[in-house]
Amino acid sequence: MKYCIIRIDEIRAYSKLEQEYSEVYDQLENGVESYMCALLDQVRSSVELANLFKFDYDRFNHTKHAMISRLKEIRAQSDIGSMLELLDTASEKRLVKFVTHYNSQLTLTYLRYRNTYFLRRMNAIKQIILGALTGLMFPILSILTIISPDSRLGSLLSLPIISFQCHVMSDLMFISILIANVLTKSLESDYLGAPPTVCEWILFLWVLGKWRSELQECINLGFNTYVCDWWNYNDILQLSLFSLTFALRVYDYIRSSSFTKHIHRDQWDEYEPRLISEAVLSWAYVFAFLRILSLVRAAKLLGPLQVSLSRMANDTLQFFCIFILVIVSFALGLNQLYWFYGTAPGKKFVCVTSNSTSVSEDCIKTPVLFTNIGNSLSTLFYAIFGIINLDKLKLSGKHGVIEAVGGSLVAVYHVVAVVVLINMLIAMMAKSYEEISSNSENEWKFHSTEMWIRFIRREFGRPPPMNLIPHLRLHMSRAVSWFRDRRRKRLCGKRGQAFFDPCGLRNKRSIEVMRRLVQRYKYTKLLGRESSEYNQ
């Protein structure tokens, strides 16, 4: 399988270099991926599937002692990073057919509900209620994980489904605190140098915990894999805006601590740091609520809609590359025509009509359209929605050529931008939605697999802000394990390391299973060829 993935990487590299043969390379890539799926079809037992994806398979035993022993075993696994390595690599390379194969999804379902299989048998209402109650207990479960990680309750947070519910509830509570921060605004604290409220202190702790989660995710995944997920850009932008808000509030508090009286909002300067912090915070709220969309990937009902929305956002970005060129070109042309009429002498042509020679002061103070680049861009953008007054382009009949050319440019812009480009964007979005709808099941499986692999391999840790509490026992055990591995390597050499290393045994089992799958695939092809020749 790894050999096939390497060949796919090479095919994609050649496809980028030799774009005139991209269709041929796409066919080769589809052929290699189909071959991987054909090998996966040859799996005959759950044990072979477990050896292929490098995890331990055991039959479901729902007794109390068996569940406690399995929880301790899962908690103590040192090779958790190698689990589902093949599926994770295929997901990273966007091998949709391989990831959505029924054997791949069977593996994912088994590891997701291992030790919590009773949750899978519940109906939707019971799952929601139990998930909400479990999620609300994430502070208690996090503390128990620190105090007694080997106990039954302390090991619950290591289960994928429990960890997912706790992280979802952590994000929902963060959103609730943001809403509470808006609803508790009052005029009494609306002055320069006001101390932070209780909600703002809680938000500060939550943002610190989210920064730690992002750093941990970047370390676990690697920088190249981390930057490939577009939702991580949303997280970084959101946390950066919150951090900038806190920094501006601290600066405002320190600067205003020497004031003898409170300076309220009606006396603030235009670029007051407190005003800038609130402007930054407003955008942070938008990106914080967008983060909730990434959590619906786990739901079969809303997951395909979220995938369609992401694909449409990608289409919108591609559309804006063309739209920006169009709007900038027309803005420069119209600004070249009307720049003079924004000056004091030029406003006489706009404000003086043919029936009167007087110039009103209100007309002089009113800005003229297309007199600078910024005004031209904003005017053309809002013109798409019909928000433009063409009467402001009249020049009292003296410069008729400028007035005629300006009107024609605006008319051509409406045809190009509204009739052509906007309809092209609608067609692109409709095409993306049709593609997702026709293959919604596989698209949802693929994107949800990316998320569940992270929880199965325990790459998220404790949810914020509980991850700010140091886990001294975990750090000490990691240090002891590191020194023990170094000692074994020094004393035993490579042979002893392979003997003590569980990953080495799993690699041997995986290679043996791959050998069997290839033999079965060859036998199936040979048998099919002989039967076709016999029928002929």
Image (cartoon, helix red, strand yellow):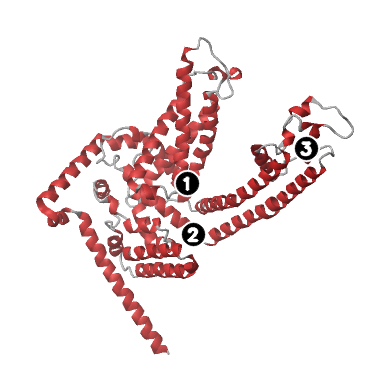
Pointer 2 with pointer 3, Cβ within 8 A: no
Q: Regarding mark 3 in the picture, which secondary structure is present there?
A: helix
Q: Quadrant of residue 359?
A: top right
Quadrant of the rendering where the C terminus is positioned? bottom left
Pointer 1 with pointer 3, Cβ within 8 A: no
The answer to whether 184 is drawn above or below residue 3 in the figure is above
Disc 2 versus disc 3: distance between alpha carbons?
54 Å
Side of 351 relative to 336 (left or right): right
Residue 321, position as x, y percentages in the image: 57, 50
Side of 486 relative to 240 (left or right): left
Residue 357, position as x, y percentages in the image: 87, 29
Q: Regarding mark 1 in the picture, which secondary structure is present there?
A: helix
Camera sees residue 173: no
Which of 168 and 465 lies nearest the eye of the viewer? 465
Side of 311 relative to 329 (left or right): left
The residue that mark 2 highlights is 441
The answer to whether 24 is drawn above or below residue 397 in the figure is below
Which residue is found at the position 40% from the left and 65% from the top? Answer: 11
